[in-house]
Amino acid sequence: GAGVSQTPSNKVTEKGKYVELRCDPISGHTALYWYRQSLGQGPEFLIYFQGTGAADDSGLPNDRFFAVRPEGSVSTLKIQRTERGDSAVYLCASSTRGAGELFFGEGSRLTVL
Amino acid sequence: GEDVEQSLFLSVREGDSSVINCTYTDSSSTYLYWYKQEPGAGLQLLTYIFSNMDMKQDQRLTVLLNKKDKHLSLRIADTQTGDSAIYFCAEGSGTYKYIFGTGTRLKVLA
């Protein structure tokens, strides 16, 4: 597609449930990032992929969060045993390399009740 | 650790200039960015400046960088109602990890 695509755009779930958020980056972009934006805050780094591998997952808050990018294109962010504090907009971005301009998707808004 | 700070709100009248300020702490920052976020939309890169530059102008946008004081500003000339959005300053040290500020909400009054 022309831009970074994220699905679902909105997800409401109950505390304790499992959630998957999907990101389809711009074709040809090797670098992919996940950020989390809480209400009234700027985006916070979660994880960075270069190709299929997670080059840096130091921003993941705990082991309930996991992300994969098995074929070096689409990525899935997985959250287990969701908590109310996980409610935020999860942003995906891609770039041609591991620096320079990031192209962001519109985000997936997660609400945990 | 690295930190990026911005004022939360700015209100200007249509046609006036807007100046959004940002301070950062990482002296090794190589690139400094301004992103715009409109309601319900993703972040859009407006402009960026290399750390070895003092100023960059791009149409209605002027970026000023004071590296000594670690201060970055974005000036929007002839501000329009369509400029109403949240503006984020971000720093990068040439690697993949960008540090974003909390954002400045710009409201343009007609």
Image: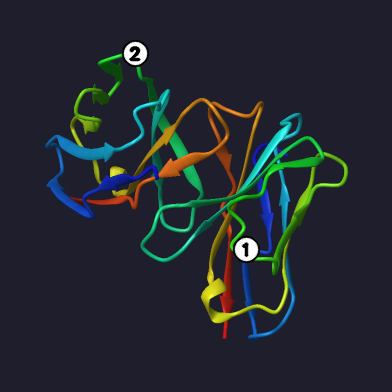
- Front-most of residues A80 and A73: A80
Callout 2: chain: B
Name the residue rendered at 68%, 40% in the picture. A32
Residue sticking out furthest to the front:
B1
Image check: B101 left or right of B6?
right
- How far apart in space, not on screen, are marks 2 and 1 (Cα)? 39 Å
Q: Residue at x 68, y 49 (%)?
A: A5
Horizontal arrangement in the rendering, residue A90 relative to residue B64 (left or right): right
Image height check: is B9 above or below A33? below
* Chain letter behind tag 1: A
Q: Residue at x 63, y 29 (%)?
A: A98
| Camera-side residue of A100 and B86 | A100
The residue carrying pointer 2 sits among few (fewer than 14), some (14 to 19) or many (20 or more) residues within 10 Å by Cα, namely few
Location of residue B26 with respect to B85 vertically, above or below: above
**In this image, B8 relative to B96: left or right?**
left
The disc at residue B52 is: 2
Q: Which mark is residue A63?
A: none
Q: Position of residue B86 (x, y in %)?
A: 33, 50
Left/right placement of residue A37 relative to residue A95 reads left
* Type of amino acid at the residue the image marks with label 1: Ser
Query: Where, quadrant-wise, is the N terminus of chain B in this rendering?
Result: top left
Against A77, is B68 above or below? above
Secondary structure beneath dot 2 equals loop
Q: Nearer the viewer, residue B54 or A106?
A: B54
Question: Is A76 above or below relative to A64?
Answer: above
Q: Mark yes or no: residue B82 visible.
A: no
Q: In terms of image quadrants, where is residue B3?
A: top left
Q: Which residue is mark 1?
A: A9
The residue shown at (48%, 45%) is: B43
**Circle 1: element type:** loop
Q: Position of residue A35 (x, y in %)?
A: 56, 52
Place of residue A11 in the rendered image (x, y in percent of width and height, measured from the top left): 64, 73
